[in-house]
């Protein structure tokens, strides 16, 4: 098996989702190469070379790849893919934008959101928002997969000494124009990679009240999430949404505050190792999945918790 | 400007999904079916573009058994002008096959904009729009939260990890919709009646020249591992004690 993993990065740092995808590649077994596609991303390639178990890093460094436009990268990945049996990418917004486009260029299908490797051609993936788990067998010559990061451990990002190879092929679409990007800068850990996540729901009541959630998160060095209800109500921006239509997280500790526990939300956090629910409604469905439930008014319980930690 | 919207008939989002006892698939017998929520958003966006004077005709296309016509009629009641039904018995087509069928329809219709939901809530694939864009060599903008048509360009704001990205796509282009693009309208009874009179053409994969090959075989469908509920604690102190000494996570 010859496996290519597409690195997730912002041209400066390698995102941890890449490490989870490398673990999935190790579960398939074989030699592993990482493709770092971007612009001015030499440092990312150096990071990738250090990942344990990686044999080779392919670096495609060109201005055409600066914004990770699927139109350009799909053609490059489809070209690189011909030397591999498997091509994996993290199941992130970027990976999901890119990989189906690669698949169609190769006249192949794609197995998305893989959560387990059964064998080199058989994989498990959630369907119906995680309410069922499908086992599928892929007979395409080149297997294309996106990997759900929370389902695989992170490969060690030190100890490797992969070789570095430059890729000079450049594809530049003329019909897509990059206009701009607004990325929220935060000192808190990234939601999908954090060890602890504190999330607030409709019960928090307002954008202003979310400060009790932030205070607890900062005390625990946690990422902050939210339910769809809190996002739809405008309390927080949508990139904080945890759930079926938002981000899927599986931290060691998930603290759900003022969240009732709609199926939509549970689909995004039920694989967390320890779940704590704080809600004043003892009948809230969140308590059915919580390891530790506290029936209390969040505006007294959360500040008390923050103070006592 | 003509818009094609691809839509899918799926289990209603409010129905609790159950896996069949033989683990062959989920049980769809006698469950409520509906227009996929992301497809509904795509139809709504097309209708709003028409109401704003940007679009002149909206064609909805679906692939599936006869019952899928219900979803075309639902889209027509929202404001779509015309429907195309590609008849297939198999409801578990590979995403690539679906994209190939849609590519043929797009080639026949020659729209300036193709709107699709970002994913269907049954297979959760999130692939068809991107594949369609590749097959047609069109620009794509997935996970759209805002679409503005300016001259020969669709300026699309996309939801990406950590924020928003805006792309300008030279038309014709493919856009897939995310949840926050719009809130679909409630359909009124007179519109449902009007929809019944709109043109709905039927075609087949054979007529479109697409073979229904499969490379993904569904071996098994299981229910996910059930998470056991834990205990209720009486106080914040008891909670801290559990997290420190039992769970050892803080």
Image (cartoon, rainbow, N blue to C red):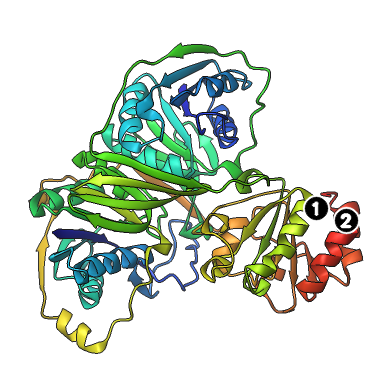
Judge the density around disc 1: few (<14), some (14-19), many (≥20) Cα neighbours within 10 Å.
few
Provide residue A33's location: percent of width, then percent of height.
Answer: 49, 20
Of residues A80 and A302, which is closer to you in this image? Answer: A302
Q: Residue at x 29, y 51 (%)?
A: B155
Provide residue A144's location: percent of width, then percent of height.
Answer: 40, 34
As helix, strand or loop, the secondary structure at mark 1 comes to helix
Label 1 marks which chain's residue? A
Whether residue B225 is visible here, answered yes or no, is no
Q: Quadrant of residue A62?
A: top left
As helix, strand or loop, the secondary structure at mark 2 comes to loop
Of residues B34 and A41, which is closer to you in this image? Answer: A41
Of residues A162 and B92, which is closer to you in this image? Answer: A162
Residue annotated with mark 1: A219
Numbered label attached to residue A309:
2
Q: Quadrant of residue A43?
A: top right
Q: Are marks 1 and 2 in contact (CB under 8 Å)?
A: yes
In the rendered structure, which disc, 1 or 2, sits on the residue that comes first in sequence? 1
Q: Residue at x 21, y 84 (%)?
A: B191
Q: Residue at x 69, y 71 (%)?
A: A258
């Amino acid at each position: 098996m010859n496996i290519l993993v597409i690195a997730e990065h912002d041209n400066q740092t390698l995102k941890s989702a890449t490490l989870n995808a490398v673990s999935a590649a190790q579960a398939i077994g074989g030699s592993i190469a990482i493709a770092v596609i971007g612009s001015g991303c030499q440092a990312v390639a150096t990071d990738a070379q250090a990942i344990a178990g990686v044999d080779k890093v392919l670096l495609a460094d060109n201005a055409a790849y600066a914004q990770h436009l699927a139109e350009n990268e799909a053609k490059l990945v489809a070209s690189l893919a011909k030397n591999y049996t498997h091509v994996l990418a993290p199941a992130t917004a970027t990976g999901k934008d890119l990989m189906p486009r690669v698949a169609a260029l190769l006249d192949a299908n794609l197995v998305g959101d893989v959560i387990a490797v059964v064998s080199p051609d058989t994989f498990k993936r959630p369907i119906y928002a995680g309410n069922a788990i499908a086992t599928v067998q892929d007979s395409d010559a080149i297997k294309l997969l996106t990997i759900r990061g929370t389902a695989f451990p992170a490969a060690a990002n030190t100890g490797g000494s992969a070789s570095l190879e430059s890729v000079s092929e450049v594809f530049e679409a003329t019909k897509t124009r990059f206009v701009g990007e607004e990325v929220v800068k935060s000192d808190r850990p990234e939601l999908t990679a954090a060890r602890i996540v504190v999330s607030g729901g409709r019960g928090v009541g307002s954008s202003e009240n979310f400060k009790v959630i932030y205070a607890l998160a900062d005390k625990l060095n946690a990422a902050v999430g939210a339910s769809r209800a809190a996002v739809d109500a405008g309390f927080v921006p949508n990139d904080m949404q945890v759930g079926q239509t938002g981000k899927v997280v599986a931290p060691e500790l998930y603290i759900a505050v003022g969240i009732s526990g709609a199926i939509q939300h549970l689909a995004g956090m039920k694989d967390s190792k320890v779940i704590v629910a704080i809600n004043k409604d003892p009948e809230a469905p969140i308590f059915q999945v919580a390891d530790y439930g506290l029936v209390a008014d969040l505006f007294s319980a959360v500040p008390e918790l923050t103070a006592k930690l | 400007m003509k818009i094609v919207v691809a839509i899918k008939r799926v289990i209603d989002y409010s129905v609790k999904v159950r896996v069949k006892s033989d683990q062959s698939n989920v049980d769809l017998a006698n469950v409520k079916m509906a227009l996929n929520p992301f497809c509904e958003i795509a139809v709504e966006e097309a209708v709003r573009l028409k109401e704003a004077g940007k679009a002149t005709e909206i064609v909805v296309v679906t692939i599936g058994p006869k019952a899928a016509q219900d979803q075309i009629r639902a889209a027509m009641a929202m404001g779509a002008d015309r429907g195309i039904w590609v008849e297939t018995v198999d409801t578990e087509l590979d995403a690539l096959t679906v994209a190939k069928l849609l590519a043929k329809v797009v080639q026949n219709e020659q729209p300036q904009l193709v709107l699709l939901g970002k994913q269907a809530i049954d297979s959760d694939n999130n692939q068809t729009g991107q594949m369609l864009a590749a097959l047609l060599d069109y620009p794509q903008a997935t996970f759209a939260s805002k679409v503005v048509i300016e001259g020969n360009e669709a300026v699309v704001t996309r939801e990406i990890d950590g924020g928003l990205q805006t792309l300008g796509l030279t038309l014709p282009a493919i856009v897939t919709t995310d949840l926050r693009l719009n809130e679909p309208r409630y359909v009124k009874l007179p519109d449902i009646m009007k929809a019944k009179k709109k043109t709905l053409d039927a075609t087949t994969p054979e007529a479109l020249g697409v073979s229904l090959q499969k490379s993904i075989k569904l071996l098994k469908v299981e229910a996910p591992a059930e998470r056991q509920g834990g205990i209720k604690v009486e106080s914040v102190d008891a909670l801290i004690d559990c997290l420190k000494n039992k769970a050892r996570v803080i």
